[in-house]
Image: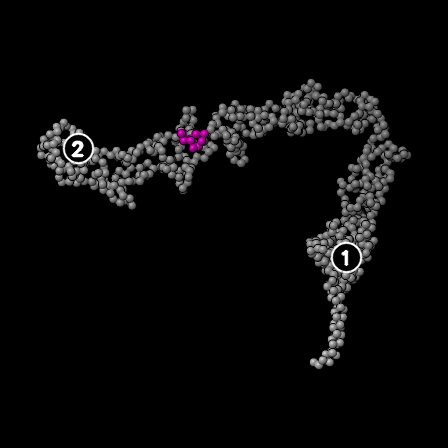
Amino acid sequence: MHTGAVRYARPWILLLRLACAGIALFLVPLAAHSQISPGPLARAHQGLNGPANCTQCHMVNTRSASFRCSECHREIAAEVQGHHGLHSTYPLPGPPGAACVKCHSDHNGENFNMLHWDPTPKGFDHSKTGYVLDGKHASTPCRSCHVAKNIPQSARALLNTKDLNHTWMGLTTTCSSCHEDHHQGRLGQNCLQCHNTTTWKGAKFDEQTFDHSKTRYPLTGKHTAVPCAKCHTPGPDNLPRYAGIKFLYCNDCHADPHKGEFKQGCDTCHNTASWMRTPFTTKFDHSKTQYPLVGKHREVACDACHKSGDFKKHIPFAACADCHQDEHQGQFAQRTDKGKCESCHTVQGWSPSTFTASDHAKTKYPLVPPHANVKCAACHVPAGKDTKYKLKFAACTDCHKDEHEGQFAAAPWNNRCEQCHNGNTWKVTNYTLARHQKSSFPLTGGHIAVACNDCHKPPSPNAKALYHFPNLSCSSCHEDIHHGEFAQRMAAKNAKGQPLGCEACHTTREWKDMTAFDHSTTKFPLIGSHRAVECADCHKPPNLERTLLHVDFSKAPHGCSDCHEDPHGKQFADKENDCASCHNSNKWKPALFDHEKTAFSLKGGHEGVPCADCHKLKKEVEGKDVLFYKPTPVACEACHGMNVPKATQKSSLLPWPRGLGSEFPFHATESNVKMQKTSLQPTLSNSPHGSLSKLTRAHT
């Protein structure tokens, strides 16, 4: 661009920048206002417009939105705090005022209606306010009640900003807030105790609870017992009258029996307590006579004693029976005081009696606890004049039911409860262990520690505890875990002639104590090594159990092969259970086998030969090497070879040695030994018995 053109363009650029800055300054306040207020306030809150009034409704320095609605709307706050009215029924979760804005939001424009009244006034459920509209109230227009004249002065202080003729607040639930109190407060504020909302005239009230003393005519004396309908007679509408009834004078209700003879009022001589009692009776001092009236006698009418009004006739009064009938019909006539009433009663009242437990202690049946705490009527059952005071008491069962149902009726008990119980408490018995030891079932061993009620308990839910058992065998209380297997053994008698029961094998000290059991009395006596074998090794528990609880002992095996493995590989199957032919129960080895009963006698030199030197045949049976005793060779050459000398003359050979290391049975000279040495040496060298030189050395 040309330099001059640039010079002329610079002022315009400056003016353009100034204009932009001015527009920006004008728009900043508008942007700031749009950030502070979300919108115009409703007409009711127009006085709070402006950024300076935000804190009038909004609380600052809180983490969540909080509002100060209740500070202005105090009538709503009072409802919520007092738990009455419509707003108190709404849930109020969250911070203050958070629940208010859910129904009454603002900043929606000046003409926005903040009251969201979903139903019409006629469709509103008034029961939500805590005051149900029923009866005539249900059809009454809303504004007939919700008007300024029905709002009490106490509620107006909270409604000073409201138009009292256009608010729904401020009313109370008392009838007098809307209706005139015709009783002028004399009967209280609760009109519903007599009236209802259906009709005013159909008043009904509880005659027992209605307080007539709050009326202009309090009821006293006999008037308190008069039925309401006697005075409140039906009016023209055939309903009881409760107003307009005369009551100033007695003759407004009562007829004058004196027919105008006395000009003064009835209350001059009479009162509401009793028509028959006149000032004469109330002013006369009976205490100045020989019989002062005290207690209940003061309430007795004069003519009850002074018949026909004759006060000059003498009346006997030395004893109660002069006037009163003997209610006990002579039951106490034999007492030292001849049954005087004042011994047990006073003129203050016939009951309660003054006869105490200390007085009872002087009778033939002194009361001791807990009898001392028993009500008199529990024994002397009230029956009016037929009440019995002379009772049988020699035995407890004269009064008490036999709790044991005759178990102790026979001798030596004879139902004498005191032999086991005392008067203090039934449940604590004085039947001690020492006394039990004298019974037909002395407690021994583990029985001593058993609680009484573990044995003496009801056999069925509706039965009493059992103390006399049909039999005293173990199975009366304990289960026979052997299921009768040892019935014969248990039936055996002891020294006292009683069945042994379980004690035939066990003791009461401990069930596992089997010292009484003698296995030698069974079909399989234990001898030798069998005595050290555990019971369960022969009497095996079923189902892999670890106890003998369900073992059938009669099924225990008796044969050797039933318990022991046959080490001979069934060589002696014909004698399978006759192991005792060769062995005994003390020790398996050495065997007791008698070789002389076989076809090969061991007499002579064979007698000391070990078995294994001849019996060497082994075979595998079921994976094991088994020594077989048959066949075993019996020919000499089978063991000694073919060079065994054959004897031709008895004098040419010496007797064969009986065994290695044995002595000769004859006296041989050294020359004889040397002479025979040459002929015997070749043969013996092949024999397992050794050479002749060994025999000679052994002999020397």
User: Residue at 48% across / 26% down in the picture?
Assistant: 442
Q: Which residue is mark 1?
A: 56
State the CA–CA distance, disc 2 to disc 1: 140 Å
Q: Quadrant of the C terminus?
A: top left
**Where are the magenta residues, as a range?**
504-515
Give the residue at x 87% y 38%: 249
For residue 505: magenta?
yes
Q: Residue at x 40, y 42 (%)?
A: 543
With 331 as the anchor, is 648 left or right in this view?
left
Q: Quadrant of residue 226?
A: top right
Left or right for 589, reference 686: right
Given the image, on which type of amino acid does mark 2 rest?
Leu
Asked whether residue 490 appears in the rendered view, the answer is no
Sequence-wise, the earlier of marks 2 and 1 is: 1
Spot occupied by residue 351 in the image (x, y as percentages of width and height):
72, 28
Characterize the local packing of mark 1: few (<14), some (14-19) or many (20 or more) Cα atoms within 10 angstroms: few
In the image, residue 429 lies at what x, y percent? 56, 27
Mark yes or no: residue 170 visible. Answer: yes
Mark on residue 695?
2
Q: Secondary structure at mark 1?
A: helix
Indicate the secondary structure of the residue bearing disc 2. Answer: helix
Q: Position of residue 614 (x, y in %)?
A: 21, 38
Front-lying residue, 236 or 45: 45
**Which quadrant would residue 61 be assigned to in this image?**
bottom right
Relative side of 695 to 407, left or right? left
